[in-house]
Amino acid sequence: MSTLPATTTDSREQAELARKCLYYMRLMREVEDRIERKLYRQGKVLGGVYVGRGQEAIPVGSILRAEADDVLFPSHRDMAAFLIRGVPPGRILAQYMGRVDGLTRGRDGNMHMGDMNLKIVAIISALAATVPVAAGAAMALRYRGSRNIAMCYFGDGSTSLGHWHEGVNLAAVQKLPVVWICNNNQYAYSTPLSAQMACENVADRGPAYGMPSEIVDGNDVLAVHEAAGRAIDHARSGAGPYLLECKTFRMTGHSAHDAAHYVPAELFEEWGKRDPIVRLESRMLDEGWIDNGELEAVRASIRREVDEAVEWADRSPYPDPATLLEGVYEEAERR
Amino acid sequence: MTTYLEAIRQGLWEEMERDQNVFLLGEDIGVYGGAFKVTEGFYERFGEKRVVDTPISEAAIAGAATGAALMGLRPVAEMQFADFISCAFDQIVNFAAKCRYRWGAPVPMVVRAPSGGGVHGGPFHSQNPEMWFVRTPGLKVVAPATAYDAKGLIKAAIRDNDPVLFFEHKALYRRVKEELPGGDYTVPIGKARVAREGRDLSIITYGAMVWTALEAAETLAGEGASVEVLDLRTLLPLDREAVCETAKKTSKVLLLHEDTRTGGMAGELAATITESVFEYLDAPIVRVTAPDTPVPFSPPLEEAFLPNAAKVVEKARWLYRY
């Protein structure tokens, strides 16, 4: 748990922050639950479904600490990035359903989406490929004399790829304004961390590149928020990149089709007790920032919001096959 | 007279003077001026912010160029040799090429790739890897043959709002020169050029092989054959209209490239011609290409590997008499 200053003003601010965190974490979980446990099973969501259940504190805590013009590179388990930047849940659902109102208009699915107006860059399936791209975005920010930074998210598995090392090294040697945020959920598909790397922590890799790194409890949203503040301040100050490793656990299979039999049941049980939403809620109750009635009201209102979003997305049409050839090049953009 | 290398240099220089968003990144391009000295003097003029010496990290170079381009800059990345572009493959074909189609984000970047053999470079400093990219929708691929086109196309590539791969042939760097016009000009991407007019047969080619084709055409002219040479200049998007036009005009087509045979540009050209203007043909389409081997090092082997005017003349004679 993060330590909190005792003054009333700070406490009010903390309470307000906690409410925001709770809203986005609950909303992300509700949207993802609906996708994975309902729409996918109904055959309305097709293809791969990868959720961030149990990892919501990482995107929520860190992005609520960022500025609106900081450039985000969310991984496939960071849906909250889109919610916080104001993308309506209906558009996210339409994206998963291959509808024309999805962010990619049906050109790509699931979390493979982005919007440069919102300063969010879309991942590709080879996730570590994002890392050098984030370094380049940071290079562009510095080039223009902007105070903004890039915030790049990836899992533990991504740190095994050459692109990760090349991108991290380039950013370090160029002292680029970028924060690397690892959601270490301890499994890359079926491969446990012990078969992924020989060092104990992803953060151990920071010093090898000449950059500071830090480990934070990735299931404590306020702790993530605070640690992200240190990382962001460092990068924004011009001191170069910062690696923040958020320890967490993937409370699902790799994707919706994967029952994760390879994960020992005790691990799910143990990490289930550290659910970031439940933890935040009890903390808020303990601190007197919220009461049970209000908590239930938040849940109910989010359920309604997502109900409406699902209906909206389901009314969105599929893309017209006649548009297949549009947008490969600038010359072939929609006319 | 301006060499092919100097023409690229001028194009880069002028674009950097014209547009503050243009910057260069690559290995040894700054203080050292580049392995081939294309960017000599740029560091002194434009400084380290706009001429970025990177670690030996082709994936990071291509990825960083993609990221900067997404942010609205116009990066020009240099691969020291086109052969090393394989290290950056994922960034180019999966990241940069697909952004616009997937989520509407333009990636106005250029990747310069010094390619081609005939320089005793061996298997890893001589390749023509253009076809890896020609079959990637979303990329544009250019391969100039002349100094004029090299300058006009590098400028057009920089101004283009899609990722452009610029294959500059190393053997042409200092061998090819011409007078260039004074002011600013560009050469349109996607437009071929008739390098020599002819009536009896067409050689369709690009890059350094344009000069081989012209040499062969000259020899054949002495034998009474009038040869047309079409220089593609851009491989993707392909100027299918110009390809079909020359095939219709001469009814006999020889396809020539320095790249290896299977899956080379010639296959796509042959398919395009037979699909569109088959009834105009008076002879089978023939190919002159490098064989399906790595590029060998030792001079007699490399000479046997590379297409040359003699090989083209031999095939063209057969075609002419058909």
Image: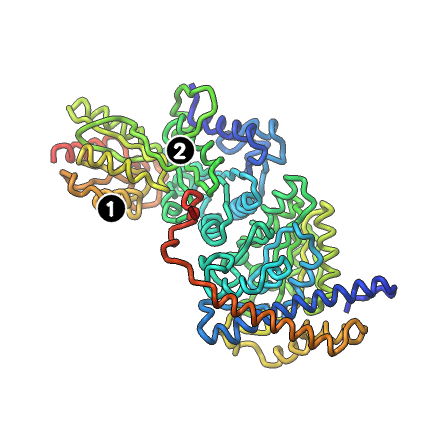
Mark 1 or 2: in front is: 2
Q: Position of residue A281 (x, y in %)?
A: 72, 74
Calculate the distance from the C-alpha at mark 1 to the C-alpha at mark 2: 24 Å
Callout 2 amino acid: Pro
Looking at the rendered structure, the secondary structure element under dot 1 is: helix
Q: Position of residue A6 (x, y in %)?
A: 87, 66
Marked residue nearer the N-terminal end (1 or 2): 2
**Front residue of this view, candidates B58 and B305:** B58
Q: Residues within 10 Å of mark 2 (few under 14, many from 20)?
A: some
- Give the letter of the chain under mark 1: B
- Could you tell me which quadrant the N terminus of chain A lies in? bottom right
Would residue B154 appear left or right of B274 to someone viewing this image?
right
Q: Residue at (42%, 39%) from the top-left corner?
A: B125
Q: Residue furthest left?
A: B322
Residue A134 in view, yes or no: yes
**Front residue of this view, candidates A109 and B141:** A109
The residue labelled by disc 1 is B271
Q: Position of residue B98 (x, y in %)?
A: 46, 51
On the same chain, marks 1 and 2? The answer is yes
Would residue B23 appear left or right of B274 to someone viewing this image?
right
Callout 1 amino acid: Ala
Mark carried by residue A89: none
Q: Residue furthest right?
A: A7
Q: Residue at (42%, 21%) from the top-left corner?
A: B180
The residue labelled by disc 2 is B188
**Front residue of this view, candidates B13 and A57:** A57
Would residue B227 appear left or right of A195 to someone viewing this image?
left
Q: Position of residue B128 (x, y in %)?
A: 37, 41
